[in-house]
Amino acid sequence: MSLSVHEQQSLQPFNTFGVAVKAHWYAEASTDAEVREALAAAAALGAPLLVMGGGSNLLLTGDLDALVLRMVSRGRRLLAEEGGQVLVEAEAGEPWHPFVLWTLEQGLAGLENLSLIPGTVGAAPVQNIGAYGVELKDVLHSLLAFDRQSGELREFRVDECEFAYRHSRFKRESGRWLILRVRFALSRQAVLHLDYGPLRQRLQQQGIDVPTPLAVSQAVCAIRAEKLPDPQVLGNAGSFFKNPLVDEALAGQLRERWPGLVGYPAGDGQVKLAAGWLIEQAGWKGYRDGDAGVHALQALVLVNYGGATGRQLLALAQRIQADIRTRFGVDLEIEPVVC
Ligand SMILES: Cc1cc2nc3c(=O)[nH]c(=O)nc-3n(C[C@H](O)[C@H](O)[C@H](O)COP(=O)(O)OP(=O)(O)OC[C@H]3O[C@@H](n4cnc5c(N)ncnc54)[C@H](O)[C@@H]3O)c2cc1C
Protein backbone atom coordinates (compact mmCIF):
# COMPACT_ATOMS: atom_id res chain seq x y z
CA MET A 1 0.00 0.00 0.00
CA SER A 2 1.27 3.42 -0.71
CA LEU A 3 1.34 6.22 1.81
CA SER A 4 -1.61 8.56 2.11
CA VAL A 5 -0.97 12.00 3.53
CA HIS A 6 -3.83 13.87 5.23
CA GLU A 7 -3.98 17.58 5.98
CA GLN A 8 -5.03 19.30 9.21
CA GLN A 9 -5.40 16.03 11.10
CA SER A 10 -6.46 16.24 14.74
CA LEU A 11 -3.97 14.46 17.00
CA GLN A 12 -6.35 14.42 19.96
CA PRO A 13 -7.15 10.68 19.60
CA PHE A 14 -3.45 9.89 19.17
CA ASN A 15 -1.96 11.34 22.36
CA THR A 16 -2.78 9.99 25.81
CA PHE A 17 -2.98 13.48 27.33
CA GLY A 18 -5.93 13.98 24.95
CA VAL A 19 -4.62 17.42 24.02
CA ALA A 20 -6.43 18.95 21.04
CA VAL A 21 -3.79 19.93 18.49
CA LYS A 22 -3.55 19.43 14.74
CA ALA A 23 -0.81 18.16 12.46
CA HIS A 24 -0.47 20.15 9.25
CA TRP A 25 0.27 16.82 7.50
CA TYR A 26 -0.33 13.33 8.87
CA ALA A 27 0.37 9.82 7.62
CA GLU A 28 0.56 6.27 8.95
CA ALA A 29 3.33 3.84 8.02
CA SER A 30 2.88 0.10 8.17
CA THR A 31 5.90 -0.89 6.06
CA ASP A 32 9.53 0.18 5.61
CA ALA A 33 8.61 1.38 2.11
CA GLU A 34 5.96 3.72 3.57
CA VAL A 35 8.52 5.09 6.02
CA ARG A 36 10.78 5.96 3.08
CA GLU A 37 7.82 7.47 1.23
CA ALA A 38 6.98 9.62 4.26
CA LEU A 39 10.52 10.94 4.46
CA ALA A 40 10.41 11.79 0.76
CA ALA A 41 7.00 13.46 1.21
CA ALA A 42 8.27 15.55 4.13
CA ALA A 43 11.28 16.63 2.09
CA ALA A 44 9.03 17.56 -0.85
CA LEU A 45 6.78 19.59 1.47
CA GLY A 46 9.78 21.25 3.11
CA ALA A 47 8.36 20.11 6.45
CA PRO A 48 10.03 18.39 9.40
CA LEU A 49 8.95 14.81 10.03
CA LEU A 50 7.85 13.85 13.51
CA VAL A 51 7.52 10.14 14.21
CA MET A 52 5.16 8.91 16.88
CA GLY A 53 3.81 5.64 18.20
CA GLY A 54 1.07 5.58 20.82
CA GLY A 55 1.53 9.24 21.83
CA SER A 56 1.88 8.18 25.48
CA ASN A 57 5.12 10.00 26.14
CA LEU A 58 4.39 13.24 24.33
CA LEU A 59 3.24 16.67 25.45
CA LEU A 60 1.96 18.52 22.40
CA THR A 61 1.98 22.24 23.09
CA GLY A 62 0.50 23.53 19.83
CA ASP A 63 -0.40 22.70 16.25
CA LEU A 64 2.50 21.03 14.45
CA ASP A 65 3.72 22.51 11.21
CA ALA A 66 5.19 19.13 10.35
CA LEU A 67 4.41 15.81 8.75
CA VAL A 68 3.48 13.58 11.67
CA LEU A 69 4.14 9.93 10.90
CA ARG A 70 2.43 7.40 13.14
CA MET A 71 4.03 3.95 13.15
CA VAL A 72 1.36 1.28 12.73
CA SER A 73 3.51 -1.59 11.42
CA ARG A 74 2.54 -4.99 12.82
CA GLY A 75 4.26 -8.32 13.18
CA ARG A 76 5.99 -10.40 15.86
CA ARG A 77 7.92 -13.63 15.50
CA LEU A 78 10.22 -16.12 17.18
CA LEU A 79 13.53 -15.98 15.30
CA ALA A 80 15.77 -18.50 17.01
CA GLU A 81 15.95 -20.71 20.06
CA GLU A 82 18.94 -22.27 21.76
CA GLY A 83 19.32 -23.70 25.21
CA GLY A 84 16.13 -22.05 26.47
CA GLN A 85 17.17 -18.62 25.15
CA VAL A 86 14.75 -17.29 22.55
CA LEU A 87 15.23 -14.42 20.15
CA VAL A 88 11.97 -12.58 19.42
CA GLU A 89 11.39 -9.76 16.95
CA ALA A 90 8.55 -7.24 16.75
CA GLU A 91 7.69 -4.42 14.38
CA ALA A 92 7.88 -0.85 15.71
CA GLY A 93 4.13 -0.20 15.48
CA GLU A 94 3.14 -3.22 17.60
CA PRO A 95 1.27 -2.04 20.69
CA TRP A 96 3.55 -2.79 23.66
CA HIS A 97 1.27 -4.50 26.19
CA PRO A 98 -0.39 -6.93 23.73
CA PHE A 99 3.14 -7.82 22.59
CA VAL A 100 4.16 -8.55 26.20
CA LEU A 101 1.09 -10.79 26.60
CA TRP A 102 1.93 -12.60 23.38
CA THR A 103 5.47 -13.38 24.61
CA LEU A 104 3.99 -14.76 27.83
CA GLU A 105 1.59 -16.94 25.83
CA GLN A 106 4.65 -18.33 24.00
CA GLY A 107 6.00 -19.41 27.40
CA LEU A 108 8.70 -16.74 27.36
CA ALA A 109 9.90 -14.82 30.39
CA GLY A 110 11.58 -11.42 30.50
CA LEU A 111 8.94 -8.77 29.79
CA GLU A 112 6.49 -9.52 32.62
CA ASN A 113 7.54 -6.58 34.83
CA LEU A 114 7.01 -4.21 31.88
CA SER A 115 3.35 -5.16 31.51
CA LEU A 116 0.67 -2.54 30.90
CA ILE A 117 3.03 0.24 29.83
CA PRO A 118 1.21 2.10 27.03
CA GLY A 119 2.79 2.81 23.67
CA THR A 120 4.54 0.86 20.95
CA VAL A 121 7.49 -1.49 20.61
CA GLY A 122 9.40 1.04 18.48
CA ALA A 123 9.24 3.79 21.09
CA ALA A 124 10.21 1.53 24.00
CA PRO A 125 13.98 1.85 23.38
CA VAL A 126 13.77 5.65 22.99
CA GLN A 127 13.42 6.23 26.71
CA ASN A 128 14.53 2.73 27.79
CA ILE A 129 11.16 2.04 29.41
CA GLY A 130 11.30 0.66 32.89
CA ALA A 131 9.06 -0.54 35.68
CA TYR A 132 9.25 -2.73 38.80
CA GLY A 133 13.03 -3.12 38.73
CA VAL A 134 13.38 -4.05 35.03
CA GLU A 135 14.40 -1.81 32.14
CA LEU A 136 14.16 -2.49 28.43
CA LYS A 137 17.98 -2.68 28.23
CA ASP A 138 17.84 -5.86 30.37
CA VAL A 139 15.94 -7.76 27.67
CA LEU A 140 16.78 -5.97 24.43
CA HIS A 141 19.01 -7.91 22.02
CA SER A 142 19.32 -5.45 19.13
CA LEU A 143 17.24 -3.19 16.94
CA LEU A 144 17.02 -2.03 13.36
CA ALA A 145 16.76 1.70 12.71
CA PHE A 146 16.57 3.90 9.68
CA ASP A 147 19.17 6.67 9.61
CA ARG A 148 17.27 9.74 8.45
CA GLN A 149 20.55 11.54 7.71
CA SER A 150 22.09 8.94 5.38
CA GLY A 151 18.97 6.99 4.35
CA GLU A 152 20.66 3.74 5.41
CA LEU A 153 19.53 0.99 7.73
CA ARG A 154 21.64 0.34 10.80
CA GLU A 155 21.52 -2.44 13.33
CA PHE A 156 22.31 -1.53 16.95
CA ARG A 157 23.43 -4.09 19.49
CA VAL A 158 22.24 -3.40 23.02
CA ASP A 159 25.67 -2.04 24.05
CA GLU A 160 25.52 0.51 21.22
CA CYS A 161 22.21 2.03 22.36
CA GLU A 162 23.71 4.11 25.24
CA PHE A 163 20.89 3.09 27.53
CA ALA A 164 20.58 4.88 30.84
CA TYR A 165 17.72 5.75 33.19
CA ARG A 166 14.89 6.82 30.83
CA HIS A 167 17.51 7.66 28.23
CA SER A 168 19.16 6.28 25.11
CA ARG A 169 21.16 7.23 22.08
CA PHE A 170 17.85 7.57 20.19
CA LYS A 171 16.68 10.22 22.63
CA ARG A 172 20.07 12.00 22.56
CA GLU A 173 20.14 12.01 18.74
CA SER A 174 16.45 12.82 18.55
CA GLY A 175 15.16 13.13 14.97
CA ARG A 176 17.93 11.01 13.48
CA TRP A 177 16.92 7.39 14.05
CA LEU A 178 13.59 5.88 13.10
CA ILE A 179 13.27 2.49 14.77
CA LEU A 180 11.72 -0.14 12.51
CA ARG A 181 12.08 -3.42 14.43
CA VAL A 182 13.24 -4.51 17.85
CA ARG A 183 14.72 -7.86 18.93
CA PHE A 184 14.44 -9.23 22.45
CA ALA A 185 16.45 -11.94 24.23
CA LEU A 186 13.84 -13.85 26.23
CA SER A 187 14.04 -17.07 28.14
CA ARG A 188 12.10 -20.27 28.74
CA GLN A 189 13.62 -20.42 32.25
CA ALA A 190 12.15 -17.57 34.23
CA VAL A 191 14.45 -15.47 36.39
CA LEU A 192 11.87 -13.31 38.13
CA HIS A 193 12.46 -9.87 39.60
CA LEU A 194 10.11 -9.50 42.54
CA ASP A 195 12.01 -7.22 44.90
CA TYR A 196 10.79 -3.89 43.63
CA GLY A 197 7.80 -2.16 45.17
CA PRO A 198 4.91 -4.24 46.47
CA LEU A 199 5.23 -7.02 43.86
CA ARG A 200 6.29 -9.95 46.08
CA GLN A 201 3.85 -8.89 48.79
CA ARG A 202 0.99 -8.76 46.29
CA LEU A 203 1.76 -12.24 45.02
CA GLN A 204 2.02 -13.62 48.56
CA GLN A 205 -1.33 -12.05 49.46
CA GLN A 206 -2.77 -14.03 46.55
CA GLY A 207 -1.25 -17.20 48.01
CA ILE A 208 1.30 -17.44 45.18
CA ASP A 209 4.69 -18.46 46.59
CA VAL A 210 6.25 -19.72 43.35
CA PRO A 211 4.93 -17.33 40.69
CA THR A 212 4.98 -17.86 36.95
CA PRO A 213 5.88 -14.96 34.62
CA LEU A 214 2.17 -14.70 33.80
CA ALA A 215 1.28 -14.36 37.51
CA VAL A 216 3.90 -11.60 37.82
CA SER A 217 2.43 -9.83 34.81
CA GLN A 218 -1.06 -10.03 36.31
CA ALA A 219 0.19 -8.68 39.64
CA VAL A 220 1.97 -5.81 37.88
CA CYS A 221 -1.23 -5.00 35.95
CA ALA A 222 -3.30 -5.03 39.15
CA ILE A 223 -0.89 -2.73 41.02
CA ARG A 224 -0.59 -0.35 38.07
CA ALA A 225 -4.36 -0.18 37.63
CA GLU A 226 -4.70 0.90 41.28
CA LYS A 227 -1.89 3.48 41.12
CA LEU A 228 -2.07 5.06 37.70
CA PRO A 229 -4.97 6.78 35.96
CA ASP A 230 -6.21 5.11 32.78
CA PRO A 231 -5.57 7.55 29.89
CA GLN A 232 -8.90 6.46 28.36
CA VAL A 233 -10.60 7.96 31.40
CA LEU A 234 -8.21 10.76 32.46
CA GLY A 235 -5.61 12.15 30.06
CA ASN A 236 -2.02 11.68 31.23
CA ALA A 237 1.44 10.56 30.11
CA GLY A 238 2.41 8.48 33.14
CA SER A 239 5.25 9.85 35.26
CA PHE A 240 5.73 13.45 34.21
CA PHE A 241 9.12 13.96 35.89
CA LYS A 242 12.19 11.76 36.13
CA ASN A 243 13.39 10.79 39.58
CA PRO A 244 16.30 13.23 40.10
CA LEU A 245 19.84 12.08 40.81
CA VAL A 246 21.59 14.16 43.47
CA ASP A 247 24.92 13.75 45.23
CA GLU A 248 25.01 12.07 48.62
CA ALA A 249 25.91 15.33 50.40
CA LEU A 250 22.72 17.05 49.23
CA ALA A 251 20.65 13.94 49.97
CA GLY A 252 22.12 13.91 53.50
CA GLN A 253 21.25 17.58 54.07
CA LEU A 254 17.72 17.02 52.81
CA ARG A 255 17.29 13.93 55.00
CA GLU A 256 18.29 15.93 58.10
CA ARG A 257 15.53 18.39 57.38
CA TRP A 258 12.97 15.89 56.04
CA PRO A 259 13.63 12.52 57.73
CA GLY A 260 10.97 10.84 55.55
CA LEU A 261 12.84 11.68 52.33
CA VAL A 262 12.55 8.79 49.87
CA GLY A 263 15.75 8.00 47.97
CA TYR A 264 17.81 5.03 46.81
CA PRO A 265 21.60 4.67 46.33
CA ALA A 266 22.31 5.04 42.61
CA GLY A 267 26.09 4.38 42.59
CA ASP A 268 28.94 6.84 41.93
CA GLY A 269 28.11 8.76 45.12
CA GLN A 270 24.63 9.58 43.88
CA VAL A 271 21.16 9.09 45.28
CA LYS A 272 17.99 8.80 43.20
CA LEU A 273 15.23 10.74 44.94
CA ALA A 274 11.56 9.94 44.49
CA ALA A 275 10.24 12.92 42.54
CA GLY A 276 6.68 12.02 43.57
CA TRP A 277 7.62 12.34 47.25
CA LEU A 278 9.13 15.82 46.70
CA ILE A 279 6.05 17.01 44.79
CA GLU A 280 3.68 15.59 47.39
CA GLN A 281 5.65 17.17 50.26
CA ALA A 282 5.41 20.50 48.48
CA GLY A 283 1.61 20.18 48.55
CA TRP A 284 0.93 19.73 44.84
CA LYS A 285 -0.83 16.34 45.00
CA GLY A 286 -4.42 16.79 43.88
CA TYR A 287 -3.80 20.42 42.82
CA ARG A 288 -5.94 21.61 39.93
CA ASP A 289 -5.76 24.74 37.81
CA GLY A 290 -8.60 24.72 35.29
CA ASP A 291 -8.38 21.40 33.50
CA ALA A 292 -4.66 20.89 34.20
CA GLY A 293 -3.87 19.10 37.42
CA VAL A 294 -1.70 16.83 39.52
CA HIS A 295 -3.29 13.43 40.06
CA ALA A 296 -4.99 13.06 43.43
CA LEU A 297 -3.41 9.65 44.12
CA GLN A 298 -0.04 9.95 42.37
CA ALA A 299 1.85 13.25 42.57
CA LEU A 300 4.19 12.29 39.74
CA VAL A 301 1.39 12.23 37.19
CA LEU A 302 0.01 15.39 35.58
CA VAL A 303 -3.53 15.00 34.27
CA ASN A 304 -5.82 16.65 31.77
CA TYR A 305 -9.37 16.82 33.13
CA GLY A 306 -10.64 17.42 29.60
CA GLY A 307 -9.93 20.77 28.05
CA ALA A 308 -6.37 21.55 29.16
CA THR A 309 -3.99 22.64 26.44
CA GLY A 310 -0.43 21.39 26.22
CA ARG A 311 0.77 24.89 27.13
CA GLN A 312 -1.35 24.90 30.30
CA LEU A 313 0.05 21.51 31.31
CA LEU A 314 3.58 22.71 30.59
CA ALA A 315 3.00 25.90 32.60
CA LEU A 316 1.83 23.80 35.56
CA ALA A 317 4.91 21.57 35.21
CA GLN A 318 7.16 24.64 35.21
CA ARG A 319 5.53 25.99 38.37
CA ILE A 320 6.17 22.64 40.06
CA GLN A 321 9.78 22.60 38.87
CA ALA A 322 10.39 26.12 40.22
CA ASP A 323 8.77 25.30 43.56
CA ILE A 324 10.81 22.08 44.02
CA ARG A 325 14.00 23.97 43.16
CA THR A 326 13.20 26.65 45.75
CA ARG A 327 12.19 24.25 48.52
CA PHE A 328 14.70 21.43 48.04
CA GLY A 329 17.42 22.78 45.70
CA VAL A 330 16.61 19.91 43.32
CA ASP A 331 15.98 20.18 39.57
CA LEU A 332 13.19 18.05 38.17
CA GLU A 333 13.51 17.02 34.55
CA ILE A 334 10.40 16.53 32.42
CA GLU A 335 10.13 12.93 31.18
CA PRO A 336 7.79 13.15 28.13
CA VAL A 337 8.98 14.66 24.89
CA VAL A 338 7.63 18.23 24.62
CA CYS A 339 6.80 19.41 21.09
C1 LIG B 1 -0.51 5.62 32.10
C2 LIG B 1 0.94 5.62 31.62
C3 LIG B 1 1.88 4.85 32.28
C4 LIG B 1 3.22 4.83 31.85
N1 LIG B 1 4.09 4.06 32.55
C5 LIG B 1 5.39 4.01 32.15
C6 LIG B 1 6.32 3.19 32.86
O1 LIG B 1 5.99 2.49 33.81
N2 LIG B 1 7.61 3.20 32.45
C7 LIG B 1 8.03 3.93 31.38
O2 LIG B 1 9.22 3.88 31.05
N3 LIG B 1 7.16 4.72 30.69
C8 LIG B 1 5.86 4.76 31.05
N4 LIG B 1 4.97 5.56 30.36
C9 LIG B 1 5.45 6.37 29.24
C10 LIG B 1 5.22 5.73 27.83
O3 LIG B 1 4.23 4.75 27.87
C11 LIG B 1 6.50 5.09 27.26
O4 LIG B 1 7.53 6.04 27.19
C12 LIG B 1 6.27 4.50 25.86
O5 LIG B 1 7.40 3.74 25.46
C13 LIG B 1 5.96 5.55 24.80
O6 LIG B 1 5.56 4.87 23.64
P1 LIG B 1 4.72 5.59 22.51
O7 LIG B 1 4.63 4.64 21.37
O8 LIG B 1 3.45 6.08 23.06
O9 LIG B 1 5.69 6.79 22.13
P2 LIG B 1 5.28 8.27 21.67
O10 LIG B 1 4.74 9.01 22.86
O11 LIG B 1 4.45 8.22 20.46
O12 LIG B 1 6.71 8.86 21.32
C14 LIG B 1 7.67 9.09 22.33
C15 LIG B 1 9.00 9.47 21.67
O13 LIG B 1 9.51 8.37 20.94
C16 LIG B 1 9.69 8.73 19.56
N5 LIG B 1 9.33 7.56 18.76
C17 LIG B 1 8.14 6.90 18.75
N6 LIG B 1 8.22 5.85 17.93
C18 LIG B 1 9.46 5.86 17.38
C19 LIG B 1 10.15 5.02 16.44
N7 LIG B 1 9.57 3.95 15.87
N8 LIG B 1 11.43 5.34 16.11
C20 LIG B 1 12.04 6.40 16.68
N9 LIG B 1 11.46 7.23 17.56
C21 LIG B 1 10.17 6.95 17.93
C22 LIG B 1 8.78 9.92 19.32
O14 LIG B 1 9.26 10.73 18.27
C23 LIG B 1 8.87 10.63 20.67
O15 LIG B 1 10.07 11.38 20.72
C24 LIG B 1 3.62 5.60 30.75
C25 LIG B 1 2.66 6.38 30.07
C26 LIG B 1 1.34 6.38 30.49
C27 LIG B 1 0.32 7.19 29.74
Image (cartoon, grey):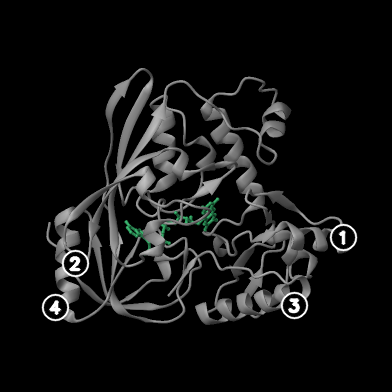
Query: Please, is residue 97 above or below residue 112 in the view?
Result: below
Sooner in the amino-acid sequence: mark 2 or mark 1: 2
Which quadrant of the figure shows ligand 1? bottom left
Cα separation between marks 1 and 3 = 17 Å
Sooner in the amino-acid sequence: mark 1 or mark 3: 1
- Which residue lies most toward the top here? 83
Say which residue label 3 marks: 326
Q: Which mark is residue 44?
A: 4
Cα separation between marks 4 and 3 = 48 Å
- Give the left or right position of residue 183, taking residue 242 as reference: left
Q: Residue at 20% of width from left, 60% of height from top?
A: 35
Sooner in the amino-acid sequence: mark 4 or mark 1: 4
Percent x, y of residue 288: 69, 75
Q: Which mark is residue 256?
A: 1
Query: Please, is residue 147 above or below residue 304 in the view?
Result: above
Screen quadrant of the N terminus: bottom left
Q: Residue at 37% of width from left, 50% of height from top?
A: 161
Q: Residue at 23% of width from left, 57% of height from top?
A: 146
Q: Secondary structure at mark 4?
A: helix
Cα separation between marks 3 and 2 = 45 Å
Percent x, y of residue 320: 68, 75
Q: Residues within 10 Å of mark 3 (few under 14, many from 20)?
A: few
Q: Nearer the viewer, mark 2 or mark 1?
A: 1
